[in-house]
Image: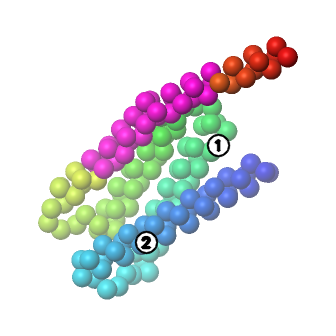
Amino acid sequence: MEDIRRLLVYFRNALAFSYSWLVLCTLAVSFAGGKDSMSVAFLFKLLALCAWGSICFVFAFFTKLMKKRGFVFCLTVFFLLFVPLEIFVFYLMGIFEGSGTPLLWITLAVIVAVFYISAVLIDVFIMRRKAKDYTEKLLEYNSKKTLH
């Protein structure tokens, strides 16, 4: 029961953060584009997108099944679960309608690819090195502890 409560807390936090951030970004883009209002239906679609993203995030990074895997595996699962629905919802919301549609879709694909590659590079070059340092220090500590 405690695990379910913990997962629900993670879901709530992820949903609150992602929804508020996406609404603020959407408002900024709308105001910059000359729109002065946003429909309730649009906000509900954003909420549904953020809820699905939060579910995918919690599943990919916080469940016992996924914690046994590495970061890159979890990130890949998250992207595979979230990005197809994100594209579908963006299409339904009409975000990429109008002129320049292929350019906007290519931009979205490039953004997703850049974030994925950046996360993988950070994991490979920074986090694994820190994990190696941490393991060495832990082994050193344990060896000193057993000698005394």
Coordinates of residue 107 in the picture (x, y in percent)? 24, 53
Residue 142 in the figure: left or right of residue 40: right
Q: Quadrant of the C terminus?
A: top right
Q: Earlier in the sequence, mark 1 or mark 2?
A: 2
Q: CA distance from mark 1 to mark 2?
A: 28 Å
* Above or below, comparing residue 58 to residue 19 in the picture: above
Task: Write the residue at 30% across / 80% down.
Answer: 31
* Above or below, comparing residue 41 to residue 141 in the picture: below
Mark yes or no: residue 87 visible. yes
Per the rendered image, the range of residues in magenta is 109-136
Colouring convention used in this rendered image of the protein: rainbow
Identified by mark 1, the residue type is Thr
Residue position for label 1: 63
Task: Write the residue at 49% across / 70% down.
Answer: 20
Q: Residue furthest bottom?
A: 36
Q: Is residue 122 magenta?
A: yes
Mark yes or no: residue 48 visible. no
Coordinates of residue 92 in the picture (x, y in percent)? 34, 65
Residue 34 in the figure: left or right of residue 118: left
* Above or below, comparing residue 50 to residue 30 in the picture: above
Coordinates of residue 4 in the picture (x, y in percent)? 73, 52
Query: Of circles 1 and 2, which is in front?
Result: 2
In the rendered structure, find residue 23 and report the number of the disc placed on it: 2
Q: Nearer the viewer, residue 9 or 94?
A: 9
Helix, strand or loop at label 1? It is loop
Q: Is residue 77 magenta?
A: no
Displayed quadrant of residue 26: bottom left
Q: Residue furthest right?
A: 148
Task: Write the residue at 51% across / 28% down.
Answer: 128
- Mark 1 and mark 2 in contact? Answer it, CB < 8 Å: no
Coordinates of residue 125 in the picture (x, y in percent)? 43, 30
